[in-house]
Image (cartoon, grey):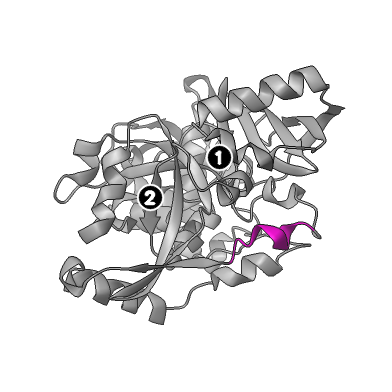
Amino acid sequence: MLFLKPFKIRSNTAVRETKTRKLIDHIMKTFEIPPDEDFIFKNKIVTELKLCLHNRQDVLCYLFDGVPYVFEHESRLFPTVFILSLLSVCNVPLVYTFESVMNRIYGGSDLMLPGVIKDGPFADSLSRLQKSAVCSVATISGSSPAFRRSKPLAVGICNLDVAEATASFAKGKLVLILHTAGDKLFELCPPHILPSFKLGDAAELKFGDSQIPVELSTVISDDLSSDHLDIEQLSQACGDASVASAEPTSDELLMTCFVYALSLLKPTDLPLTVNVFYAKYMKTECPDGSKLDIKKTSYKKVGVFLEKMAEDGLIELERVGEGIVRLTAFHNDHPTYVSSILPEGFHVTSLAFWLSILTAF
């Protein structure tokens, strides 16, 4: 996710009228917005922000009357949840998930296929997906025959094509999330304007009972009975729009930091003493608000944990003296590492990722 962590604003520039017209034309053409919906741009002051993200990536963001409408990342234009909430028609496909899954997305997780609603009438939403295309994510709540659909609450890039997404027992990441309602970009919206977007509203969807599989109604009902964040709280999140994700256990946090630390290592960094590896790489890569303490884990000592990882084949250790152990190699083809490795610059904060690592053993 691009905006999970705070970013720096390198410049804040008012956009001239000529460039504004070109920008609006570009937005409408890119997202196939009908001409009669250009009112969302009219008589608004446009500002260009140059952002430097936590991973040193540069992103351009365009604000209309202080509200982020679009951002440009790697020469591609992406909509925000604000502009999507205003549009009745556009070419950005919408993928549906459960509210509890959306809470994990707020915390930094990508949207995994098992968390996508693709049964019954919701299967049509997947037919528009194209690999590498822009898409958005909304939630479904309620019960058959009356379901409720939220407004788009996340924006990302589709990671699979239609055939892969609809295949039986398919797994993997369907949407690589870039922006959500509640991230740092979302917080740029002036608090007094935020309620006008009504991001907490949900539209009613009515289907015949024959269209809704029993399994889907059961899953959604179970999801609603679980502990989840009420989407309407978003409309009240003016000063602090951050959404907290579930807290990991100490062992889960340890494994998360370990795998992410391995992804940071270069061949020239090895061999590396295990105490330096733990202090310099593992402890410094904790998710926001977390603190890694080996004594609170079931392993109690770094050496015990790393020896277990060596037994499982993830790493190789070498004893070079009394009490001195070095990490000499790690195997990036190991199934646990391959299934858990993150894109460059991604900071781990999702419970789904922690659990995926632990269940791989």
Whether residue 21 is situated above or below residue 259 in the rendered picture: above
Q: Position of residue 337 (x, y in %)?
A: 35, 40
Q: Which residue is mark 1?
A: 277
In-front residue for pair 209/200: 209
* Secondary structure under the numbered disc 2 in the rendered image: strand
Identify the residue shown where x is 32% and y is 55%: 116
Q: Which residues are magenta?
A: 193-200
Instruction: Confirm whether the magenta stretch covers residue 174.
Output: no
* Figure check: 21 above or below 199: above
In this rendering, the answer to whether 132 lies above or below 110 is above
Seen from the viewer's position, the closer of residues 79 and 3 is: 79
- Which numbered marker is on residue 95? 2
| Relative image position of residue 236 (x, y in whole percent) | 70, 69
Query: Which quadrant of the figure has residue 115?
Result: bottom left
Say left or right for 13 vs 97: right
Please tell me which residue is depicted at 60% across the width and 49% down the height of the picture: 86
Q: Residue furthest bottom?
A: 225
Identify the residue shown where x is 40% and y is 47%. 94
Indicate the amino acid at tag 2: Val
10 Å neighbourhood of mark 1: few (<14), some, or many (≥20)? many
Tell me, yes or no, if residue 10 can be seen here.
Answer: yes
In front: mark 1 or mark 2? 2
Q: Is residue 313 visible?
A: no
**For the residue carrying disc 2, how many other residues have a C-alpha within 10 Å: few (<14), some (14-19), or many (20+)?**
many
Q: Which mark is residue 18?
A: none
